Image: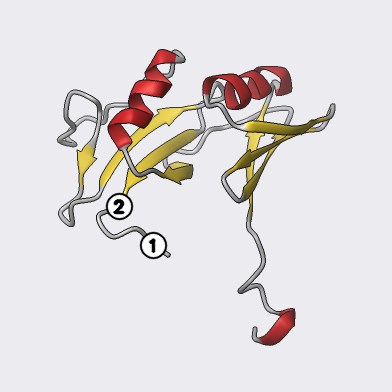
Amino acid sequence: MTGEAGLRGADGIGFLPTTDLERARRFFGEALGLAVEEATPFACVVRAGATMLLVTKVEELRPQPFTVFGWAVGDIRAAIAALRSAGVEMLRYEGMPQDTDGVWTTPGGEEIAWFHDPDGNTLSLTRFTNPPT
């Protein structure tokens, strides 16, 4: 797609499912410190930087075994410390060499850590060696 009808300049919207909107609102708004823009009986809209994150109510949920949303951070250690102080635990994966903070360093030098939201969705933090523009 090209020109003004394309999506090149459009802002993305992320979607995450939850079985409990109030619990999700508290987690994303209080534990993660994201701005809650709207809360309805059907969804909770939070702002993750320039990205709108729509946390939607579902009746049942099977969390996926992979990352469904993540953040690029400049200081992964500070981000982990802030999350831990809010009660968020970093995930550990068997067979993956992670340091004491739960950080895995890729062969290219990026640092990645993972955590779950209250519904078991896997979220991540990434410190890029050459941040994307």
* Alpha-carbon span between mark 2 and mark 1: 8 Å
Relative horizontal placement of residue 12, taking residue 45 as reference (left or right): left
The amino acid beneath tag 2 is Phe
Q: Residue at x 68, y 28 (%)?
A: 60
Quarter residue 97 falls in: top left
Q: Residue at x 66, y 72 (%)?
A: 7
The secondary structure type at the circle numbered 1 is loop
Which residue reaches farthest right? 41
Residue 57 shows in this picture: no
Are the residues flagged by discs 2 and 1 in contact, CB closer than 8 Å?
Answer: yes
The amino acid beneath tag 1 is Pro
Crowding around mark 1 (Cα neighbors within 10 Å: few <14, some 14 to 19, many 20+) is few
Residue 23 shows in this picture: yes
Residue 132: numbered disc: 1
Q: In the rendering, at what x and y percent does residue 106 appear?
A: 20, 49
Q: In the rendering, at what x and y percent does residue 120 appear?
A: 51, 26
Relative horizontal placement of residue 10, taking residue 121 as reference (left or right): right
Q: In the rendering, at what x and y percent does residue 21 appear?
A: 72, 23
Relative horizontal placement of residue 81, taking residue 70 as reference (left or right): left
Crowding around mark 2 (Cα neighbors within 10 Å: few <14, some 14 to 19, many 20+) is some
Residue 128: numbered disc: 2
Residue 99: numbered disc: none
Q: Residue at x 18, y 32 (%)?
A: 98
